[in-house]
Amino acid sequence: VPDVIVHLTNDYRILWVNRAARQMFKLAEDSRSYQGRHCHEVFWSRPEQCADCPIVRCASTECNEIGFLSPAHNGQEFEIRAIPMRNQAGEIGSIIEIARDITAHRKLEEQFRQAQKMESIGTLAGGIAHDFNNILSAILGYGDLALEDMAEDHPARKSVQTMIEAGMRASHLTKDLLLFSRKQVSQKEAVDINQIIGRIEKFIRRIIGEDILCQTHLAKESLVIHADSHQMDQVLMNFATNARDAMPGGGVFSITTERIRIDQDFIDLHGFGIPGPYARITVADTGKGMNPQTVAKIFDPFFTTKEMGKGTGLGLAVVYGIIKQHQGHIEVTSTPGKCTVRSEEHTSELQSHSFI
Ligand code: ADP
Ligand code: MG
């Protein structure tokens, strides 16, 4: 039985444990090392009962109890069921505990919630973007017509030109929105991701400017994936833009590619993935990094920490949408404030986003 099963006295002392419990809590084969001792002490090295433990509740309510505990402080979560066992007189003689590690389950739930949130905002944004784009077409079209009718030295010419430029910027923004809301179909073909990076590198250098060093560490072998190369370009450009914004004083931006294989160990560790060969692209920069609250939100549409007019909060939402469309996965790690990079070394990777 893979679930942890423990038989306890009604004052929470261990009578018997199954093999899964011995493995999970690394107990000795010899039952004398834990028999008769309190469960919180043996399992969690705690002097007192865990707060809100269903076993404790079960002892007082005399009913089946269920609860979710994270007693280990390592992100692990357990679903614990406690079932009272009665003796012939009908009193509770002992308690059966059944515990299941639901950490991976919770991670999946979290991903599902995120996917749902993205989808609903995507639908909303896509709907607005579509209508908005139609209005913009009229503004831009009539702007052009007005310009055509104006003499070269007409005093309003400059104003109309500025209006058209602003309209174009709005149009780019709606393209981003449409991309994010998956209304644009991607055209996938077999492409070598190393070649894509090689081709776009010079544009990236232009985006990040001269103060930031762009390093690429590409896999020796070609990494052919089924992808829309324009969308891949977009992903890389969005990363580069963010890296530039994170390093106003200069630094290093790096792109690494490698071939990896997703196996069961990987899936257990990350809580996602379908086994098979994948291309992994890791981008890292030596910028100011992010705190955990920011990390938790960066893929949310419209989430930005930048001042008004600077950030739209769509860059990484678009990236997220594209990666999902490619049956990929994306992850981010970051440590804020550890900006102790020695520029001559250019080695430390303060933070990285990797997508597979
Ligand atoms: P925007 O760039 O318009 O703010 P994004 O979706 O591209 O929107 O990014 C969302 C937020 O994630 C940014 O406002 C910033 O706080 C954070 N972020 C993204 N990339 C980085 C990075 N490389 N370094 C630090 N923070 C970042
Ligand atoms: Mg951005």
Image (spheres, rainbow, N blue to C red):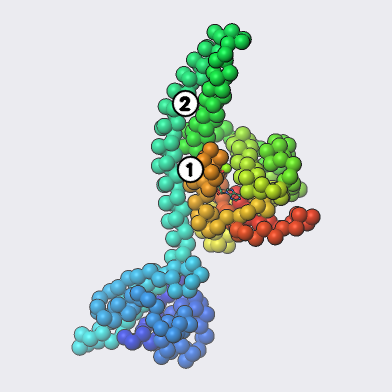
Q: Is residue 335 above or below residue 311?
A: below
Asked if the residue at label 2 sits under 8 Å from ligand 1, the reply is: no
Q: Bin the neighbour count of mark 1 within 10 Å (Cα to Cα): few under 14, some 14-19, many 20 and up.
A: some
Q: Secondary structure at mark 1?
A: loop
Q: Nearer the viewer, residue 323 or 15?
A: 323
Identify which residue, 123 or 188, lies in the foreground. Answer: 123
Contact (Cβ within 8 Å) of mark 2 with mark 1? no
Picture quadrant of residue 244: top right
Q: Earlier in the sequence, mark 2 or mark 1?
A: 2
Residue shown at 53%/58% (left/top)? 292
From where the camera sits, is residue 205 visible? yes
Q: In the picture provided, is 87 more to the left or to the right than 272?
A: left
Q: Amino acid at mark 1?
A: Phe
Measured from the top left, where is residue 77 in percent x and y?
A: 44, 68
Q: Which residue corresponds to mark 2?
A: 133
Q: Which residue is denoted by mark 1 in the rendering?
A: 302
Task: Indicate the position of residue 56 as horizontal and vertical percent values.
Answer: 32, 80
Q: Amino acid at mark 2?
A: Asn
